[in-house]
Image: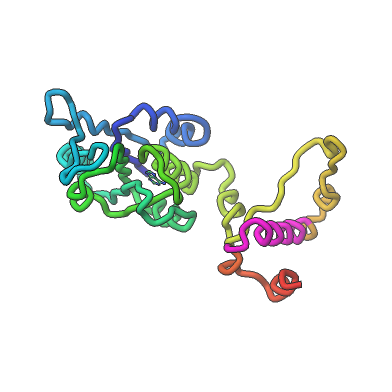
Amino acid sequence: MNFHILTLFPDMVLDGLHTSIIGRAVENGLISIEAIDIREYSTDKHRHVDDYPYGGGAGMVMQPMPICDAYDDLCDRIGKKPRVIYLTPQGTVFSQKIAEELAAEEELVFLCGHYEGVDERALELVATDYLSIGDYVLTGGELPAMVMIDCISRLVPGVLNNDVSAEFESFHDNLLEYPQYTRPEEYKGLRVPEVLLSGHHKNIDTWRREQSIKRTYERRPDLLKDAVLSKKEQEYLES
Ligand code: ADE
């Protein structure tokens, strides 16, 4: 899977994405992450990439030429026209389901805006998807792009050590993950639940499932409407 990030701050995304699990995935050749500096495509002698908004108003707007030229150059280089995700609070809110859909792509482009935004014509010409990471406004698209790349990368086979772990975690089945414990058995008077020490796998599975349902009910009841629950579990929730 190859990620291409169109940005004015290449160091920010590269530094952030070359550590830990994602860094290892890059080293192992499972994914590649390239930052394309939009400023390199400026046609201006001062390397400007933004200008005042037509119609007036505060802030600057990123011009269409450097963005479109950077994208065209990439397409020529890789011989494909990949999907382009524009990061914006005006987009559809990113989710695990969207991550799963995007993980099936071979190439993905992330277009990071800054200032007051991007000239609408650049978006008309290159953007295929508009995605947000939540209902709040950041200073640019770099952090959202990093969030999405992290999330999509861990779905690429081989990126997580344990193949099954992406399946059995938060949002699998629309339920939150059960609580986890490690050694010691007792810490500051708090004991690991006995069932987890019992070695009885069926009881452990049952306990974990109950904990997932309980936690989802308490913290994210909105998720339960799409969760697949047995009749017994449904009754337990209603009691
Ligand atoms: N750019 C600025 N804020 C954003 C957000 N919440 N999601 C995606 N891109 C953004």
User: Which residues are drawn in magenta?
Assistant: 204-222
Residue 148 visible: yes
Ligand 1 quadrant assignment: top left
- Is 212 included in the stretch rendered in magenta? yes
User: Which image quadrant: the N terminus?
Assistant: top left
Between 64 and 212, the one nearer to me in the picture: 64
Residue drawn where x is 18% and y is 26% of the image: 47
Residue 39's spot in the image, x, y percent? 22, 30
The x, y position of residue 61, in whole percent, is: 23, 40
Quadrant of the image occupied by residue 234: bottom right
Horizontal relation, residue 166 to residue 76: left or right: right
Residue 72 can be seen in this image: no
Seen from the viewer's position, the closer of residues 57 and 124 is: 57
* 187, above or below 101, in the image: above
Q: Nearer the viewer, residue 70 or 168?
A: 70
Residue 215 at x, y = what percent?
Answer: 69, 56
